[in-house]
Amino acid sequence: MCRFLAYIGRPIILNQLLYEPKNSLVSQSFHALERKEPLNGDGFGVGFYVPEIDPIPALFVATTPAWNNRNLRYNAPKIRSNCIFAHVRAASIGYVSETNCHPFHFGRFLFMHNGEIGGFAKIKRRLRDRLSDERYNWIQGTTDSEHLFALFLDKYLQPSRQKNAHGMAEALDETYAEILEMVARYADNAPSYLNVAVTDGTAIVASKCTLGTSTQAATLYHSEGSRFSCKDGICRMEQADPAEHSVLVVSEKLTDVREDWQEVPLNHFVVVQEDLTVTLHPVKAC
């Protein structure tokens, strides 16, 4: 399984999320603290928004380990964004290639996944048969995650769907229900792990969901405050200015400040709305 972080709020320099915290995402690429296998070296990706230039996000992915990529190290201190998705990969389904690196991108959307769809090889053909031609032809890689994203897009982009955070959560729940029905029918209810995050640059929906397993779910936390700051190697979510708001959703706590982090309950969505209000909702499909 992988590690990821999602950020939305006051514009922040990428370096403050990827490198500066004690348990930064780059640190998690070689020494993750909250999973049995500490290595996540099968590539990485960073997507970020610059809405004053374009609503379509920028995206940088590579198959090299995040800890050993000089371009990432050089550019992270020079990029500022109000919405950032970053992911370090431990490949489970799909070979190591740029097309299989998260986050995946379609239009205004970014999507990333920590986990796997149980028995994906047994349902892959059936899943692809349910996609629109546009989404079917859009898929470039071989991961279960990209197929999951494609099915979500078909559901969310329906004309009748609310185009907001709650609409994204509903579409993701329907996506899970359809996929888990296929897993139950064709793959003997193989265990599925669906820690997922999706954004359109204005809101974020993330989930912590498992099915068909007694194994503990992968960790997921959220943190909110006025801003996330790092100074002299000390990072924390500050509560200084009620007029500002920032939210992080992460696979692992970035710091040791326990009160800054709230664990997402099993089989729940964390929904960060356009006004940066954070709410938790059960995942009906799980």
Image (spheres, rainbow, N blue to C red):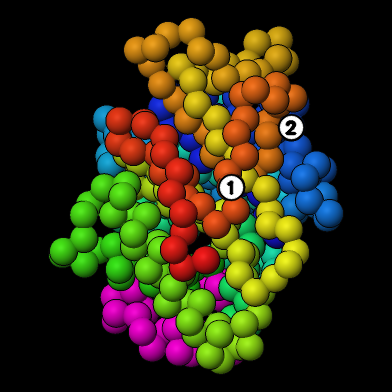
Q: Quadrant of residue 63?
A: bottom right
Residue at position x 38%, y 16% from top? 244
Mark 2, other Cα within 10 Å: few <14 / some 14–19 / many ≥20: some
Image quarter (top left, top right, bottom left or bottom right) of the N terminus: bottom right
Magenta highlight: main SS:
helix
Residue 23, numbered label = 2
Give the percent coordinates (x, y) of residue 185.
53, 90
Mark 1: few, some, or many residues within 10 Å (few <14, many ≥20)? Answer: some
Circle 1 SS class? loop
Residue 119 pos. (x, y %): 63, 82
The relative height of residue 283 versus residue 139 in the rendered view (above or below) is above
Q: Quadrant of residue 152?
A: bottom left
Task: Tell me the kind of residue under disc 1.
Answer: Pro
Residue 220 image offset from top left, x and y in percent:
62, 45
The disc label shown at residue 13, or none: none
Q: Amino acid at mark 2?
A: Asn
Magenta residue span: 121-144
Q: Look at 51% across and 52% down and name the residue there.
A: 268
Determine if residue 76 is in view: no
Q: CA distance from mark 1 to mark 2?
A: 22 Å
Is residue 221 found left or right of 273 in the rendered image? right
Q: Which residue is mark 1?
A: 265
- Element under disc 2: loop
Residue 137 on the magenta segment: yes
Q: Is residue 22 found inside the magenta-colored segment of the image?
A: no
